[in-house]
Image (cartoon, rainbow, N blue to C red):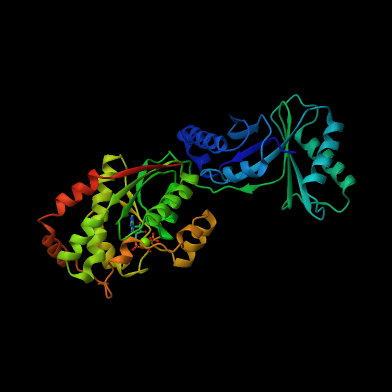
Amino acid sequence: MFTSFLIKYAEIGIKGKNRYLFEDALVQQIKYAVKKCDGEFKIRKTDGRIYVDAVSDFDYDEVVDHLKKVFGIAWICPVKVLHDEGFDKLKQDVVAYIDAVHPDKNKTFKVHARRARKNYPLDSMEINMDLGEAILDAFPEMKVDVHNPELMINVEVRDQIYVYSINIPGPGGMPVGTAGKAMLLLSGGIDSPVAGYMIGKRGVKIDAVYFHAPPYTSERAKQKVVDLAKIVAQYTGPIYLHVINFTDIQLYIYEKCPHDELTIIMRRYMMRIAETIAKKNECLGLITGESIGQVASQTMQSLAATNEVCEMPVYRPLIGFDKMEIVEVSEKIGSYETSILPYEDCCTIFVAKHPVTKPNANVIRIHEQNLEEKIDELVQTALDTDELIIVQ
Ligand code: ATP
Ligand code: MG
């Protein structure tokens, strides 16, 4: 039935002079997406529109699934392409199209014709009227509503004739690659994959870092993070995941610092290390899955204490989200099932029974001085043993 898809984009349509950069980035991302599908496709950009044309057999559901993950796409419209064999034939074809695509005829509709080819014998108004009449003749249950139709039957006269009436929502946002790169602190939880998704949705390319604490955290916990990165990468493209061995740093903090401040000091070292890797890799910011008040390490005071060790902006897209809202997004993007697998993460192993909820940054700084002797060396070793996994 369908051999083409019309891709509509909302926000990137309004970027003025830079519009072509956004369109080119979107075309590029669409190319990556369909490359993962069976079949061969051509991507065309014409008159402020992007078309994906199938030039071989393909799996409709597979293509739609992949396009639904391309940031920058507002709507995906499957198109029936008809040869121009005269207006009478067009009437028959459009009636047959509606019969096949919209089995429920109890609907209001409107025909919306556009002529990209001006030498067509009828003008847009005439096409609207005559096709509308043909549809009413064929399906008396249908009714015209020009203001608020349930079905908008679009007919575009080009070298061939394009008919479409289905609008499948895309993810919105901006094409990846239009906004620089950021380093996501990715754990095995529910929040950080969602945070990565949300910043990726604004066109940002994502790198990631995971702090691993073997043997306290298992190989399976690490694999879970790789799996989560894979899910996020379906939307953001390949992710360079840095796995940092954090065990010795954690043990050293455990040995030298008050246990109720452990989490916060550990988080400060995570941020410092993440920032060093981020700078080395031309990232413009860090991303975390923090949300105010969710746990002791995410009170305003804790966030302030964590934040002060970074020079780079730290993006926290979930900062005002309730857990339920975060879960909703994670279910939508497909990371929830993996996130809730029960493998331990490195924070849960060393947590104190009663962590500070209102850390004083001055006090934390003083206690961090207990680490002076060995911490720089341990951080350097952690950086030197960075394991890079390219997640596709
Ligand atoms: P998440 O669901 O993302 O794990 P959380 O609710 O468990 O979050 P914390 O454990 O306090 O919260 O972590 C807060 C943020 O710190 C995470 O969202 C993540 O960005 C980062 N983070 C925590 N642990 C790690 C880790 N082991 N490796 C990388 N980043 C981490
Ligand atoms: Mg966590």
Q: Residue at x 79, y 39 (%)?
A: 128
Rendered view: 381 above or below 123: below
- Residue 370 vs residue 72, the one in the foreground: 370
Residue 271 place in picture, x, y as percent: 26, 54
**Residue drawn at the location 32% of the way across and 42% of the way down:** 283
- For the image shown, how many numbered marks are present on the structure? 0
Ligand 2, image quadrant it occupies: bottom left
**Quarter of the figure with residue 134:** top right
Check the image and name the residue furthest to the left: 373
Q: Nearer the viewer, residue 320 or 208?
A: 208
Q: Would you place residue 361 above or below residue 21 in this image?
A: below
Vertically, is 143 above or below 297?
Answer: above
Q: Residue furthest bottom?
A: 354
Viewer-proximal residue among 157 and 345: 345
Image-based side of 357 in relation to 96, left or right: left
The residue that appears at 82% across and 43% down in the rendered structure is 132
Which residue is depicted at the point 26% across and 48% down? 275
Report whether 227 appears left or right of 111: left
Quarter of the rendering occupied by the N terminus: top right
Q: Answer with left or right where residue 362 lies relative to residue 99.
A: left
258 sits to left or right of 215: left
Q: Where is residue 219 in the image (x, y as percent from the top left)?
A: 37, 54
Can you see residue 127? yes
Please name whichever residue, 113 or 317, is drawn nearer the observer in this view of the structure. 317
User: In the rendering, at what x and y percent does residue 245 appear?
Assistant: 27, 52
Where residue 88 sits: x, y (%)? Answer: 87, 32
Residue 73 falls in image quadrant: top right
- Residue 46 visible (yes or no): no
